[in-house]
Amino acid sequence: MKPAKITTRTHLGFIGLGYLGSRIARRLAAAGFPLVIWDRDSSKYAEFSGIGVELASGPAELAQSVDVVLSCLPDDKAVEDLYFGTGNLLATAGTYADIIELSTIAPDTTRRLHDAATRLGISVLDVAISGSTPAAESGALTLFGGGERVVFDGAEAVFQAIARQWFYMGPSGSGLAMKLAVNTLLGLGMQAIAESLALGTALGLPRELLFDTLAKTTVIAPAHAGKLASAKRSDYAPQFPLRLMRKDFSLILSEAARHKLWLPATEAAAAINSAEADGGREEDFSAVVRRMQQEAAMDWTTQATESREPACSCQVISRI
């Protein structure tokens, strides 16, 4: 292992320019880090034009030209393919580049990457991200880290460029474990808000008054306040897409099953999220508000009540 302190002179490579990744990469470039980027979709390079970043032709070229590789990918399959599959990045990196893995994946996947990298003398951190696109844009993310403490502490310059706060959670996989715990609350909270709005509507509360008053109560968490404001405008432009929340729910419930833990409320919230995601639209996970307005048989765009079949039928069966 060769843990070293990262500075703004450290050459960084960034792989995965999605909703969060593109914004994180731009902040790193703005902070002065020499930056090389790569994404499977080359059309994403356009937004980096003129800001002094280098473009790599593939993961191998990137890994051989930088000191630290950061990856921010959509799921376990993409991470495994990058490091162990067609990307072959782990073998390519050799002892040149250490790794900061930002993707939300199963803790076991990152532990497997960590163990394989350790045998090659490569340091790996799992640094899970909490926050959607506005937080990434403004550098106000929250980060949860897993891996060796000395490596985590040495990466502080990167964290300062992209986050408001960061926490070391323990050995490899611990950052992702914390992210899954946090996103359990995120998903459940959004579903609770959607149900609260559906109930208030069914009870005859005026829409504007319902939204505005609920927003001013102490029960709305900061992470949900912006979602509530967007839902009031029927704006479900993706900041954290339904499909990614569905993926996180799947990870959460898989880990719960592995540990023989029953999460009935999470199961129900996951079912509603999945039903809305099945529509195929690239929308924010707060679109469950619209799903529940359908359950309340209310079209809020016209304020006309209509009779509908329930949009989703979910049953939670008591284990008592």
Image (spheres, rainbow, N blue to C red):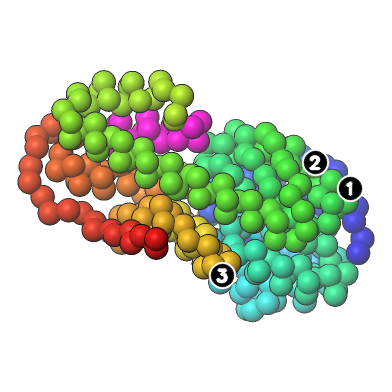
In the picture as drawn, the residue positioned furthest to the bottom comes out as 85
The CA distance from mark 3 to mark 1 is 37 Å
First along the sequence among labels 3 and 1: 1
Q: Which residues are magenta?
A: 221-235
Q: Is residue 241 above or below residue 228?
A: below
Q: Callout 1: 10 Å neighbours few (<14), some, many (20+)?
A: some
* Disc 2: which residue: 157
Q: Secondary structure at mark 2?
A: helix
Quadrant position of the C terminus in the picture: bottom left
Residue 276 lies, in percent from the top left, at 30, 55
Q: Is residue 209 left or right of residue 35?
A: left
Q: Is residue 257 left or right of residue 238?
A: right
* Disc 3: which residue: 258
Q: Does 62 appear in magenta? A: no
Numbered badge on residue 308? none
Q: Evaluate if marks 2 and 1 touch, with contact meaning CB atoms under 8 Å apart.
A: yes
Residue 205 lies, in percent from the top left, at 20, 25
Residue 209's quadrant in the figure? top left
Identify which amino acid the numbered label 1 is placed on: Lys
Query: Which of 277 and 30 lies nearest the eye of the viewer?
Result: 277
Magenta segment's dominant SS is helix
Numbered badge on residue 5? 1
